[in-house]
Amino acid sequence: MIRITQLKLPVGHSREALRQKAAKILRISPQSVKSLRIVKQSVDARKKEEILYSYTVDVETAGESQIVRRAKSAQIAAVRQERYVFPAPGEERLSHRPVIVGSGPAGLFCGLMLAEAGYRPLILERGEDVDGRRKKVERFWRDGTLDTGTNVQFGEGGAGTFSDGKLNTLVKDPGMRNQKVLEILAEHGADPEILYVQKPHVGTDVLSGVVKNIRNHIVELGGSVRFKSLVTDLLIEDGRIRGAEVNGQEIVRADQVVLAVGHSARDTFSMLLDRGIYMEQKAFAVGLRIQHPQNMLNVSQYGEKGAGILGPAPYKVTWKSSGGRGVYSFCMCPGGYVVDASSEPGMLAVNGMSNHDRGGINGNSALIVTVGPEDFKDASPLAGVAFQRQLEKLAFDCGEGKIPVQLYGDFKRGIDSKAFGDVEPQIRGRYQPGNLRRVLPEWLSLPLIEGVDQFEGRIKGFSRYDSILAGIESRTSSPVRICRDQRLESGVRGLYPCGEGAGYAGGITSAAMDGIRVAEEIGGRYRAD
């Protein structure tokens, strides 16, 4: 294969134009190109009057080594197409099939890899399947009826099911796990463009079907998935896992238990602490969701010419405040909605969500400020959880059980909002005006305001008075880390903390990759028979 980088073409070009440009760079005829695969596609919008797609492509043709030598260009190189390889099975025998706690990305991908290798895993999910889950979530958004077992945080697919379904990650990937995750998602119903676009996403409407397809595939391969099955205790003997208690009554025997519980399993964290599982506090971030007109963002990012062609524009902004705290956007949802993502009575948290077409009139993102153990004033591993709950209780009270919303200009001035401006709220869930300065402490509000005003210099209109804030965004990542060793086990042998809830991931892709890592560790030690 020959890899070509920095191949640029105008937006709206044809597939044939890509083939011809590749052939021109290689100085061969287009007919000599046997195959062409897009490795990466990104947008070059530095010149708003001439927006381009920038590609990395792999080309198959005759005489490749001679072509590369002749080119003498850093843009052209010979490459081997590498593929992900699951390890050969180990020698130790399994007394019971592996048990996976949680069916979010970490649990599902761990389960799928083990099922494909013949280990017949059992996945225990506290919430309902994705169809039942959607009904309960929509009812909650409609009338406020919260099911603490099945909601935006809990149920098949995990918290990412009700999100934008973003798949970008900063995790280094020498083992090709990232590519494997994307391939699996595409095989199970995601748009194949996720394999090469710079900022891939699935969309909540498509992701629901994808996770169902993955679950069905696991079952077809001999695995099992059980819903409404909350793990309430662990069976530990002589420092080794021996099984799990389900729903306070049933015992499931296992010598390998994967903890893929997600970042909101606060009752599970408490149970683990009671069982002596070593955990530690971890830094995370909290803040508010902000909504802007998507068309305003499109024009700012792409200019008038690109706003309609390229579709809803994303953004990513960061700032270090004068007090030293990081302020940054998180989980930006182009053409999306702010959603009520609460999971506990008397508390309120929000998240962002987009469908695949990102067709909403607003873009929203979390604007968050870093917090860490030094802010919690408590040595308990669950001090971060207590801090989250404190903020969520204030948000619930501020909105009288509904999402509290406020214009940014009013938030900055510390006054109540009386009416919306030109920005129309795009929210799934009940909402009402509330003064969010009473929710977010001043040592977090002031850096956030400083950040928003700085971001105006990068995105015109970002600090507009009538942009809409909603809170509280408290579930950005896990507030704890369930410690594990080089074999990915906790201090209890056979217990594998995994994914975002355990503190080893920060989104759908990295969680899925960590699930694959744990599956590799189990598969490389044990035989499948």
Image (cartoon, rainbow, N blue to C red):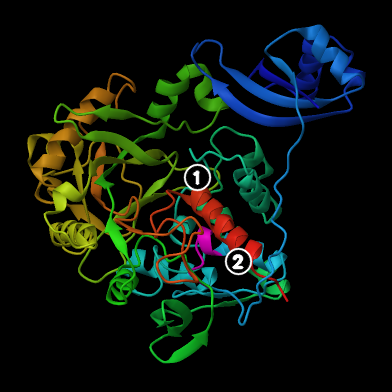
Question: Residue under circle 2?
Answer: 111
Asked if the magenta segment contains residue 104, the reply would be: yes
What is the residue that sits farthest to the bottom in this orientation? 249
Q: Amino acid at mark 1?
A: Lys
Which quarter of the figure has residue 195? top right
- Image point 44% across, 38% down: which residue? 334
Asked if the magenta segment contains residue 521, the reply would be: no
Element at badge 1?
loop
Q: Quadrant of the N terminus?
A: top right
Binning the other alpha carbons within 10 Å of mark 1 as few (below 14), some (14 to 19) or many (20 upward) gives: many
Above or below, comparing residue 235 to residue 28 in the picture: below
In the rendered image, residue 309, in percent from the top left (x then y), is placed at: 57, 26
In the rendered image, residue 457, in percent from the top left (x then y), is placed at: 28, 18
Above or below, comparing residue 127 to residue 24 in the picture: below
- Image point 38% across, 75% down: which residue? 149
Q: Which residues are magenta?
A: 100-107
- Say which mark, if any, is on residue 202: none
- 420, 320: nearer the viewer: 320
Binning the other alpha carbons within 10 Å of mark 2 as few (below 14), some (14 to 19) or many (20 upward) gives: many
Q: Amino acid at mark 2?
A: Gly
Q: Earlier in the sequence, mark 2 or mark 1?
A: 2
Above or below, comparing residue 326 to residue 130 in the picture: above
| Residue 211 shows in this picture | no
- Image point 65% across, 61% down: which residue? 524
- Say which mark, if any, is on residue 166: 1
